[in-house]
Amino acid sequence: MPLRLIFMGTPDFSVPTLLGLAGQGHDIAAVYTRAAKPGGRRGLELVPSPVEREAKCLGLAVHTPASLKGAEAQAAFAAHRADAAVVVAYGLILPKPILDAPPLGCFNLHASLLPRWRGAAPINRAIMAGDAGTGITVMRMDEGLDTGDMAMIERMRIGADMAAGELHDAMARLSADLMARALGALERGTLQFTPQPAEGVTYAAKIDKAETRIDWSKPWQAVHDHIRGLSPFPGAWCEMLGERVKVLRTTKGEGSGAPGMALDDRLTVACGEGSIRIVELQKAGGRPMKADEFLRGTPVRSGLALG
């Protein structure tokens, strides 16, 4: 029979799983998400999270506590009497009383093949490191940082030119299916768990703005991976004709030269080794543009130095 669940998530990545669980007939007793933040055109109105918007459309009760560390918040969580909790990019630490409240446990969808890329930015870090593949792990949560026993995994290939935004969307869809299968096995009592291996642990630190500037002195592959790993947000950037420009898509270029130098009038740029060709970019305050469109308004000639 369907499970009584608490769903915990915040960004767009979480939404397909929430919709999938609701569509499968599970009894979602409550939805926990981060509180609305100031936004809008002037930054004055409170903008709810994507999960809050979808949950309210589904008629589900939404809770936005600032913390789950207090006794009152923990009692309120336990009062839902859920069989299990499903956690997808929630954004708050779950203390032990929260983890222990659902009798079947709290289950997290993590966007990597654990134990590789534990932490905040696994999708970005996998691409930035040049990984050829990644995946999604369903794990039963414990008090560590993404250290819980693994229940199910699904592998995915990372295309040579795939950007973080594309991988994010593909993984969000796959996550919903994987969690549905995991909960089906949990209902039947057949879900099995495997401890994470001690070898191969890496950490996916949160992206720092200081690391978003393009370093043209690196080999073309490293520059390419850096750009696509940060696309579309926060975006890798460089100085071009005195303006700060985000570079959103690149591919392998032809030719070589001084790092940062334009090698032709088609936005092929030399790196420390080899070159990349810019395919899509965005001026500050503007919209993303294909290279051809950008060049019609902003010609970039061979020999120009990009900063």
Image: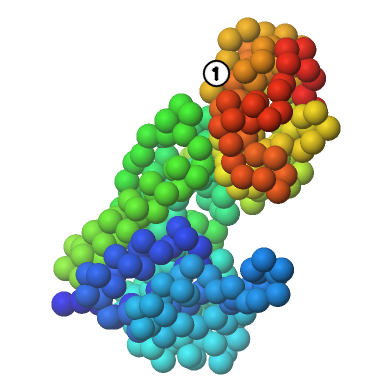
Residue 117 image position (x, y, % from top left): 52, 45
- Res. 261 image quadrant: top right
Q: Residue at 62% x, 45% y: name it.
A: 287
Callout 1 crowding tier (Cα within 10 Å): few <14, some 14–19, many ≥20: some
291 or 260: which is nearer to us?
Answer: 291
- Res. 230 image quadrant: top right
Q: Residue at 54% x, 23% y: name it.
A: 251
Residue 106 image position (x, y, % from top left): 40, 70
Quadrant location, the C terminus: top right
Q: Where is 214 relative to 109, above or below?
A: above
Left or right of 126: which side holds 269? right
Residue 27 image position (x, y, % from top left): 27, 80
- Res. 217 image quadrant: top right
**Does residue 273 show up?**
no
Residue 2 image position (x, y, % from top left): 20, 76
Q: Amino acid at mark 1?
A: Lys
**Residue highlighted by disc 1:** 252
51 or 124: which is nearer to us?
Answer: 51
62 or 111: which is nearer to us?
Answer: 62
Question: Extreme right residue here?
Answer: 242
Q: Where is 57 relative to 298, above or below?
A: below
